[in-house]
Image (cartoon, rainbow, N blue to C red):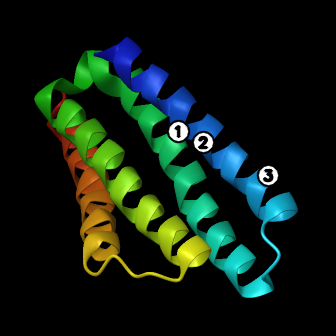
Amino acid sequence: MQRIWIALASLTGFAAVAMAAFAAHGVQDPDAAHIVASGVQMHGWHALALLGTGLWSPRGGWLTNAAGAAFTLGTILFCGAVYTHALTGHSLGSVAPTGGTLLMIGWLLLGASALRTR
């Protein structure tokens, strides 16, 4: 799983940088650009979280893999909902809070995997 988490971290980081560039050069509305920038910040932090998950996964067991899954799905849901709202004005309802909850669960799982490992 180590290679999978590191590959996902790379793709997530790429997407975060691409969205940052789009926000800086392609979004005319300053409010929308600010919302996208908030999404980019979370996107980037969780690319790093996935990288850490990949580096820790050989020792972390199933909790680490669960953390990686939570980070991946949470990032897709949270950032996707934030970007959709910023760029279209349409809210996706509970998608962003669900994604945010998964991101928090991912951090708890990663911490638990560190404490559980001997």
Q: Residue at x 67, y 53 (%)?
A: 19
Quarter occupied by residue 53: top left
Direction from residue 25 to residue 14 in the image, left or right: left
Question: Where residue 40 sits in the image (x, y, percent)?
Answer: 62, 59
Could you say which disc has been placed on residue 39 in the image? none
At label 3, the amino acid type is Ala
* On screen, residue 66 above or below 76: above
Question: Where residue 37 sits in the image (x, y, percent)?
Answer: 68, 68
The residue tagged 1 is 12
The residue tagged 3 is 21
Label 1 SS: helix
* On screen, residue 34 above or below 8: below
The earlier-in-sequence mark between 3 and 1 is 1
Q: Are marks 3 and 2 in contact (CB under 8 Å)?
A: no
At label 1, the amino acid type is Thr
Task: Measure the C-alpha gap from mark 3 to mark 2.
Answer: 10 Å
Q: Residue at x 55, y 75 (%)?
A: 88
The residue tagged 2 is 15
Quarter that holds the C terminus: top left
The residue closer to the viewer here, 112 or 83, is 83
The earlier-in-sequence mark between 3 and 2 is 2
Label 3 SS: helix
At label 2, the amino acid type is Ala
Q: Residue at x 25, y 47 (%)?
A: 70
* On screen, residue 98 above or below 49: below
The residue closer to the viewer here, 106 or 117, is 106
Quarter occupied by residue 33: bottom right
